[in-house]
Structure formats: structure tokens, C-alpha cells
Image (cartoon, coloured by chain):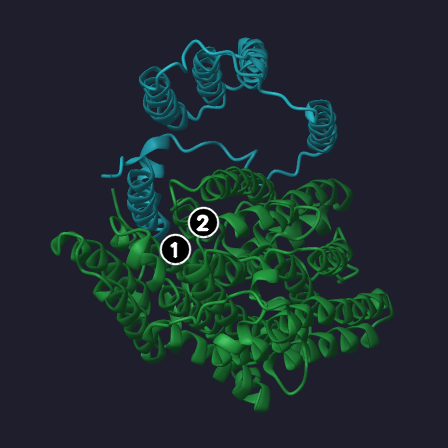
Chain colours: A cyan, B green
Amino acid sequence: MAEHASVGIMFWILAIVVVVSGFLVVSLRNIFHCALFLMLCLTAVAGIFITLDAEFLAVAQVLIYVGAVSVLMIFAIMLTRDLADKQIPQTNKHAMLAFLGCTAFVLGIILVLSGTDMWRWAKTPLPVENVMTIGKLLMTKYVLPFEVISILLVAAMIGAIVLARKEKA
Amino acid sequence: MDFQLPEYNLQLMLPEIVLFVWALVVLSFDLATKRKSGSAVGYLAMAGVLITGIVLAFTGHGQGFGQMFVADSMAVFFKMIFLCAAFMAIGSSFGITKDKIVNHRGEFLGLMLFSTVGMMFLASSNELLSLYVGLELTTIPLFALAAFFKDDKLSVEAGIKYLVVGAFSSALLLYGISFLYGLSGSTDLLLMRLNLAASALMDYPKVAMVFVLATITILAGLGFKLALPPFHQWAPDVYQGAPTPVTAFLSVASKAAGLVAFAKIMVIGLFAYYDPFVAPIDWGMLVGIMAGSAMIVGNVLAVRQTNMKRMLAYSSIAHAGYIMVGMLAMNELGLASVGFYMFAYMFANMGIFAVVALIEERTGSAEIPDYGGFSKSSPFLAVSMTIMLLSLTGIPPLAGFFGKFYVFAAAIRQAGSDPVHQWMYWLVGVGLLTSVVALYYYANVIRTMYFGAQTDVPRIEFTAPALTVILIGVIGTVVFGLMPNVVVEFASQIPISDMIILP
């Protein structure tokens, strides 16, 4: 897939969608609109994963970030009183400074990454059963971090519940 | 489909497993007693940490899960520091679990134990993926712990700030790590190092550019975690707002965890920075600037603080700077001095925070002027605090003095061994000068306690666990000051030479 010319065009369309919607997420004043654009941004990232032949990542991206995380966010916004139609400025007096800093950082990254082709696996063909390989690795070589993540999720859940719970008077 | 299962060697992981199960026991005990367990749940958590420490002492060295999990001297040493810090943090939290967080005692202690488990996994990780997961398991419970006083605006602010900074710094770190993976094609630290060296030999300028980018993003990410300038602004607000035992835990254990992550990625995973042939970037100079500015910024800004917790936050920034000086001296003394400094810093800092927590519970204030006349009402606490403050200052013969001594000695030896490292003399000079500034603000607290204007300080009652913590702090400070070689010998088993020289 990666050799096809249309993939290049697809990438640029998706990249523009990602950047524009990402910028809107951090600049719009209505938090509900921000959440919707976040969904768009994350979906476009999933599209970029597809152009890179990483179907598993694309599916996981849609399932987890678009499906679960963003929907939860929208729920939280809608269930919080007076939040969905409030106008909240997202910038303070440092906005310009931050913008310049980030632009410089991005230009630096572009400069560096466009000047190198030393990526180790870039020229190796992908395994045919991509998803199966990932699953196998997660269950064998990387089983330890995989299991530790479940402890992490337990801890995060407990922390979130404690903070969100309403206390009895 | 064939599965190549790695050799697990689960017994090496026994301490982590014990502590994790114990955290679950603590959580369920609090629920089973219908949240009326009082201080019993606290004693249960302390017992768990103790038992884990004993298990750790009898667990051998080796590798498990292929090579994902390593139990070597460095891991065991830092795990001991984490467990000690957790023990002392839990011991000084009996006051707040008694009255302030009656509904969530189990969760408070359980989250602290989870965070400790994360640190232990981090210390044993041998490759970037488990290192990152360990680091996240360390910090995510701490976000919740910092915001644990939900009605207190400062505490909630601390939690949110820590969350945002923590997430941002993790993202930076991960971004840098992804470049390193891209270049080397491996997440295993030693393999990564070999592959990086190999590709640097093939096409030096192309590799060097990406390497610089990766180093800068990783240093920024770790700089946030360690609160090294210019990434330190979050620390005072978070330290002031978080519950005092959590602040203590943050300032010692999570700092030590950041150090371990630094040592693993920068020292083991990347080239020794001064190797003129293969090192594409002299990151030593960058870290040196960060360490130097940490010592200056931390110590100078600490002078102006009137809140004890804020002052200790700035002083912890300065201490991170001193520790990084030892980290930069990559000789036999280097990592050992880092280990010893961390050890001495832990005793003194955890002890001081235990006293601060006691005073805060009684008077509701952590302002230094409110400590006036404190020595008359509670002479024992005042003496203990004085000893530990003097240790942080670096007054001989207390442990803190030898911490600074070893760190500077390691740096001077490194500076003398190679003209490339001349700049380390400057670092030592900055360290010595700023230590004098530190004397001023630490002594100011002592002066207030003994000669300050009399406020009506009530007599501070202390519980047995708090007393234990303070005694551990004082005894550790004094004993390891009198015989520092015990720890240094243990710490110098850390196989630094294996790590620096290519295997």
C-alpha cells in the first residue's frame, strides 16, 4: 500500500485535518466543540496509521481514543451543569510565547527528521500477519510491561473514583 | 503458531508481588471494617512495607522475563530507598488519616503502595517499554494523592498542576524514546546502545542530528520529573498544596525514581557522554548547566520563602542539582555518591516532613514564623528538626555532609582525569558557594524555633508511628554520618564499570 501515489495524497489530506482540528481543540472557546474536534483529530490520526500499514494501531486508535475516551469526555461535559454552552477563553498572556516556542520546536523537528534516513527497520518489509505478531509479542517478550499496565489501570481507577466521589457530609 | 515463552524467574519479582498484593489487602481491609479501622489500616500498610523489605533482602540477583526484569545491586539499593521512603511517608500520615480523610484511608495508603510498586518495577526495568510503564505507575497514583484534600483549593490545584506537568513530561520523554527506538530498532537498553554506536559509525552526521533531538526531548522530560531548571516551576505549588506526607514522598521517592530513570536511559542506554569517538552530543554539558542552575535557583529562591513546604520544595530542587553533579561524574565514585546522597537526603527530608506534618496538624500552619517558640513547647521535636536541617545543609559529621563530600569528590576526580571535564570544577565551585546560601535559610528555621518571637505554640502531641519516623530520620542521619562507608560500600557494588564500558 505504501508505494501507491494516492497514499501520499491521502497522507497530506489527513495531516491537514489533524493539524487544523488540533489547533481548533486548543483555541475554540466552547469546550463541547473542542471535544468534537478532538474526535475528528484522533480519527484522522487513525487514518494516518492506515497509510502506514499499521492497521492494528488504527483500529485501537478508533476504539480507544475516538470510541471510549472522547465519548466519555463528551458525557462528562454534558453531565456537568452549565458547561456545554459556556464560553471559556483558552489562552492567557503567554499564548504568543508558547506559540512561538512550539513553532520553533516543530521547525527543528522537521529540519532534523527530513535530513535523515537512518531508521533501522524502515527498509525491512512488514510481517504479513501484523496483528498476530503484535499479539504474540505482547504475550511473550513484552508480557511484563503488559501485566504491569493492568496494575497501573487499577491504581488509576482507584484514584479517579476517590477524586470523583461525592463525600457524605 | 509457536510461542517462545521467556524464562520467568518469578521469584526475583517476589518483593513487587508481595507489595502489590498487600496494597490490595490494605484496600479491602479498609472496606471490610466499614472504614472504621482507625489507625489499624496504617499499621497494616507499614507492616506490608516492612515485610516487602525483608523479602527484598532475601531475594537474589538475576534476570527474569527474558531480560526484561533485572534484579542487580543498583535495583536492590534503590528499591530499599523507595521502601524506606514509603515506610516513613505512611508513618507520618497517621495524623491526616485520623481526622482528615476518614472515608478514604485505605485508598490513600493503597495508592501510595501502588506508586512504590511502580518505582520498584522501574528500578528493575532493563528496557524502555517497562521503564516507561513503571514510571507511569509511579506518577499516576501520585496525581490522585496530591489532590487528596478535595475541599482544599491548594491541594486540588496541586493535583491538577502535577497531572498536567506529569502528562506533558511523559509525552516529551516518550517522544524522545521513540526517536531512539527508530534509530536503534530495539527497546533493550544495552542493545540500543550497541545499535546506536553501530549506526553512528555508519553515517555520523545523520545519526547525530536525530540523537541531539532525542537527547533534548528526553532531558526535558526527565528534567520535569526531577524538577531541574528550567523545568522546575511546578514543584513549589505542588509541594505546598499536596498533603504533607505526600509532599514528603514526592520529594524523596519520586525524585529517586526520576534519578533511576535518568541513570537507565542516559547512562546505560546512551553513550557515555564524553566518549569523543561515538558520542554525537556532549549531553554532559547540558545536564551540567541544568544541575548548576538547579543549585543556584533552588538555593537562592528558598531564601525568600516563608512557607516551610515551599522552602523545602526549593531546597529539593537544589538537592536534585547536587545529585546530578554526582551523576555526571561517571567514575567508580559517581553512582555510589548519588546513592549515598539520596540515602542521606531521604532520612533528613522524610524526618523533617514528619515534624512539619505534626505541627501542621496541631496548628494548621506550615508558615516558618509560626514556629517561633516551638523549642520551648516541644523540645524533642525541635532538636530532631535541627539535626536533620543541619544534615541537609551539609554540616559534618552528619550524613548530609558526606553526601555532598562524595558527590563533589567524584566530580573533582572526573574533572582532574580528563581535560574535557574541566567545566566540572565550575560545577563544584557553584555547589560549594550555594551550600553557604543553604546554610542561611536552614539556619533561619532553627533560629525561629529557638529564638523566634514567642507565639502561643501548643505542645505537639505525637503518635507512635510519627515518633518512629522521626527517630529513624535522626538515627539514620547521625549513624550514617558517623560511618558513611557502610552505605557507600553497598552502593559502590553498583556495577558502574559494566554499564559505562560497552559489554
Say if A8 sits above or below B459 in the image: above
Residue at left 30%, top 55%? B99
What is the spatial separation of the Cα atoms under label 1 and label 2, in whole angstroms? Answer: 7 Å
- Asked whether residue A146 appears in the rendered view, the answer is yes
- Which residue is the extreme one toward the bottom? B482
The image shows residue B433 at horizontal and vertical percentages of: 81, 69
Is residue B35 rendered to the left or right of residue B70? left
The image shows residue A76 at horizontal and vertical percentages of: 34, 22
Q: Quadrant of residue A61?
A: top left
Say if B305 sits above or below B481 in the image: above
The image shows residue B293 at horizontal and vertical percentages of: 76, 55
Residue at left 60%, top 42%? B176
How many residues crowd around disc 1 within 10 Å: few (fewer than 14), some, or many (20 or more)? many
The foreground one among B268 and B85 is B85
For label 1, the residue is: B115
Please state which amino acid type lies under the numbered disc 1.
Ser
Residue at left 48%, top 20%? A45
The foreground one among B311 and B480 is B311
Is residue B38 rendered to the left or right of residue B383? left
Please state which amino acid type lies under the numbered disc 2.
Thr
- Chain of the residue that carries numbered disc 2 in the rendered image: B
The foreground one among B265 and A129 is B265
Q: Quadrant of the C terminus of chain B?
A: bottom right
For label 2, the residue is: B139
Q: Quadrant of residue B41?
A: bottom left
